[in-house]
Amino acid sequence: MSGTHEPVDLTNCDREPIHQLGSVQPFGFLLAVSSDWIVTRASANLAEFLGVAQADAIGRPVISLITPESLHAIRNKLTTLRGSDVVERIFGIALILDQNRFDLAVHLNGGEVIIEGERRQEDRHDAASLSMRSMLSRLDHTETLEAFFREGARQARALTGFDRVMVYRFDESGSGEVVAEAARAGIGSFLGLHYPASDIPVQARALYLRNLFRIIADVDAVAVPILPQRDEHGQPLDLSMSVLRSVSPIHIEYLKNMGVGASLSISIVVDGKLWGLFACHHYGPRLPSAQSRSTAELFGQMFASRLESRERRLALDYETEARRIADRLLTSVADNASLLDDPAWLIEALADAIPADGIGVWINGRLALAGIGPDERSFAALVRHLNRSATGRIYAVDRLAEAYPDLEVDDAVAGMLAIPISRSPRDYVVLFRQELVRTVRWGGDPHKPVEYGPNGPRLTPRKSFEAWSELVRGRSLAFTEAERRVAETIRVTLIEVVLRLTDEISMARQTANERQELLIAELNHRVRNILSLITGIIRQSQATSVGLGDYIRQLEGRIQSLARAHDQITRDHWAPASLRQLLLAETAAYLGKNAQRIQMSGEDVLLEPQAFSTAALVFHELMTNSAKYGSLSGTGSGTVQLGWHRDDEGNLRIGWREKDGPPLVEPTRHGFGSTIIRRSIPYDLGGKAEVRYVKDGLEADFCIPARHVVGPTSERSNPASVGATERETIPDDQPLSGLNVLLVENNLIIAMDGEDILRRLGADVATAPSVAEAMEILAGQSFDLALLDVNLGEETSFGIADRLAADGVPFVFATSYGEGIAQANSHSDAAVLQKPYTMEGVTGILARVPLPRRG
């Protein structure tokens, strides 16, 4: 090697291909097997474990090396693999005809099966006797995060038996800190030490995310090569998911410098990111059994899950309190906008939400300062800097001098959170934090000069792991992600107030007025539609009831089902709602303690509001019928299996299967409830419904189209408030006698109600739920009158009106929005019927329509 070297820096370790080292640790063997079960590669120590030389194994069927029973077990285990980054384990299997038992790890690598084996070890008593449930219980009973970390380290040491177990947490820069430790006496402590990001290179972090467990049994062990080193394409074997993967020489040197003889790492993955590690050190060789290692890996995953829940709960508690403060801030400023000119009041109002040491306010070129912060000239300069960045974004730094080196700011000010509170001109509330002078104890000098070592032109790991203290200057306490989210809430809150103080106020008021008018119209439409729906239910329920009590019970059940559905979809402001929650609510309301008789299966999906209400009625009727006549009737053991899934096209397939109920016979006459079950989903949603009466009980299959499938306020409908509708009488003179009438209405129950009224007025009625079906009916049949619902879900009936006008057919618009909505088109002179449909309303509107004379 010449006297000059290429530059070497901390990224050398980042570029080392640690997943392609081409060798394994000697405590086990590796076989790479093709998809047709031919051995393509093997570790050189194969004979030590299976009695077959590596060279003799290559190219042979794997069945010639191991017993048929063990191959069968491996094949079965492969069927459970889901994805490429999964390793399955088999414990205590006999691979060959001797007394040895093996523990295997099996995973897929491209088109190959990777089999890794090691001789079975008897579990140590201390590891085997640990109860995962009791371990997690001890974790759950810790009151603080610090105690949680300590307990996690203690439990991991009890599982692995290593001399030292550390909980190692990464910060945003990639540096790590030992936040908890459990160690045997007399070996010192690493608690509180920091380690630079270079200690765990980039590609090692990526591997820790994929392969959650890493064991290095003996740093002095000689790695065993995998032969042949490269395949026919010249590629080495990817050992990313390998249990036996050998160790980088650089990492071996690193461990030896620390005096470590064996190590074990368990990844702590929180919210999909590498939060940290359980880092375990032993000051001699150590290899826990494969079963103990699997238990430790499971504990690591459970620890991460508990940690994620704790962090989310803490963040939620903080944000909930902070939003309450923001609401109070909005209320105060709304009553007295001049408070924004008082920075002392603002810092006091915001202190509990986002702790700060000073505040600056810039509105319309006027500034105010309080607490620790820059002077007026420097603050004005800072605002100009902020104006260069993208508008409308929260901006936070914890090293202000580094971010703005040309800004003259007092050294005591180190951190800043800028909250833009307008767009034009740009106004700001800026929170300042003072310098946090602290001492960081590094595990070795993080600034140690680069040296060339025995591993060639690569970075030599630090040889001194004595604590090296560094006084951190010019940095403040960083603003957390939760604090930034709260700042965004405050930004939106203050913008609402500042808009009233700028020339944007007129635009804001105009937008608010338009939104209010739209909301009123939408509310009017929904209220009228609900009334129409309830009116139809009242009429149709009466038609199929055998007595007053039966009528009241049926009516009450159906309206309550609608009310429950309405509660769920309005809780999220008319957003899609959960199918499972719908079914659970309906089951609990109808079956109570017997709810377990309905066995549900399926991954939860969301339904659009229209589909949600339709499904609520359908499943209410299914449960009602089953409780009266089917498997849920009486106190028997009958059950219902209710499952759902989405097909390849995204449609929702739902199956209802009744079991162990009384024998069923298909009824000769279908009542209102049966009609709802058979026709609602096809009619209202364009889906499919199939009902079968079989020996074991009712079977039903439904298909809800993908466009309705996309995840709870409590309002109760009072059925007594609509009870007088059925007292409407049919006129003595039937004005529609002998006439053909087309009814276009997209809701089945409302359509059935409209059909009844029109037929009692003497008409022959054809009904369509959509523009396309209405046009198809018009192409094959002539009509004397049409009744058109304006709003048909995602479309309107104005196109049908154009067709009818061209054919000279009179028509009436039906709407819940009001006449202005129906007439906002080229047919402004058309008659408008306000929904819900009533006998009085329909007969009254007919007086305004030129009907053809009856012959």
Image (cartoon, helix red, strand yellow):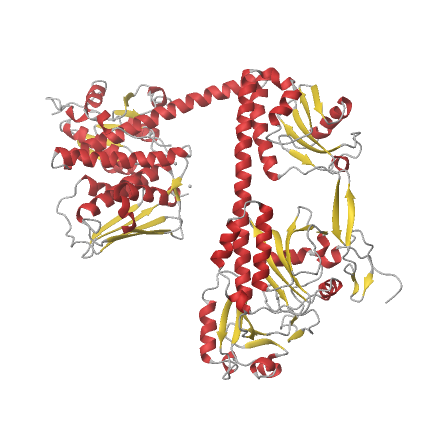
- The percent coordinates of residue 253 (x first, y second) are 74, 65
Classify the position of the N terminus by image quarter. bottom right
As rendered, which of 185 and 838 lies closer to the eye? 185
* Residue 133 in view (yes/no): yes
* Residue 422 in view (yes/no): no
Res. 221 image quadrant: bottom right
As rendered, which of 832 and 606 lies closer to the eye? 606
Query: Which residue is located at x 77 percent, y 39 percent?
Result: 473
In the rendered view, tell whether residue 650 sits above or below residue 33: above
In the rendered view, tell whether residue 555 sits above or below residue 525: below
- The percent coordinates of residue 98 (x first, y second) are 51, 84
As rendered, which of 389 and 298 lies closer to the eye? 298
- The percent coordinates of residue 488 (x first, y second) are 58, 32
Classify the position of the C terminus by image quarter. top left
- The percent coordinates of residue 282 (x first, y second) are 66, 65
Query: Which residue is located at x 39 percent, y 22 percent?
Result: 520
